[in-house]
Image (spheres, rainbow, N blue to C red):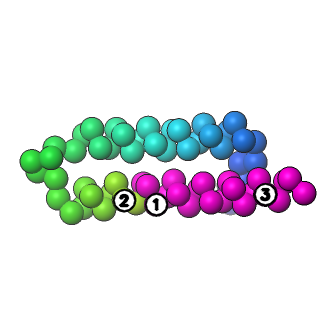
Amino acid sequence: MSNSITDKNKQVNYLKERLQIFVEVLDAIDPETADLEDIDRLIKIIDDVEEKMDQFNNRNEFTKE
């Protein structure tokens, strides 16, 4: 199991890196030949980022107490 990221700066950097990957994948897709699999891959990346944001928010709520 991986270590939890609890430092806010590390959390932000993680999210920035994931979003950079999204941008790179998006840039690599040719709009003329993009298929459903390409779109699904983009949606998966965004879903993963959203899930991580929720996890980070929950961790930060627990550390405030």
Which residue is painted at 53% across and 57% down in the image? 50
On residue 61, which mark appears? 3
Q: CA distance from mark 2 to mark 1?
A: 6 Å
Q: Residues within 10 Å of mark 3 (few under 14, many from 20)?
A: few
Quadrant occupied by the C terminus? bottom right
Tell me the SS state at disc 3. Answer: helix
Q: Is residue 62 left or right of residue 56?
A: right
**Magenta region includes residue 13:** no
Residues marked 3 and 2 touching at CB (< 8 Å): no
How far apart marks 1 and 3 lie (CA) works out to: 21 Å
Looking at the rendered structure, the secondary structure element under dot 2 is helix
Q: Amino acid at mark 3?
A: Glu
Q: Find disc 1 in the rendering and name its residue.
A: 47
Mark 3 or mark 2, whichever is nearer to me: 3
- Is disc 1 in contact with disc 3, using a CB cutoff of under 8 Å? no
Residues drawn in magenta: 45-65
Point out the residue furthest to the right here: 65
- Specify the label residue 21 is tagged with: none
Tell me what residue is drawn at x 11 percent, y 50 percent.
33
The residue that mark 2 highlights is 43
Q: Amino acid at mark 2?
A: Ile
| Left or right: 40 as drawn, with respect to 31 | right
Q: Earlier in the sequence, mark 3 or mark 2?
A: 2
Q: Evaluate if marks 2 and 1 touch, with contact meaning CB atoms under 8 Å apart.
A: yes
**Whether residue 3 can be seen here:** no
In the picture provided, is 6 more to the left or to the right than 55? right
Going 42% across and 54% down the picture, which residue do you hit?
45
Q: Quadrant of residue 29?
A: top left
The amino acid sitting under disc 1 is Asp
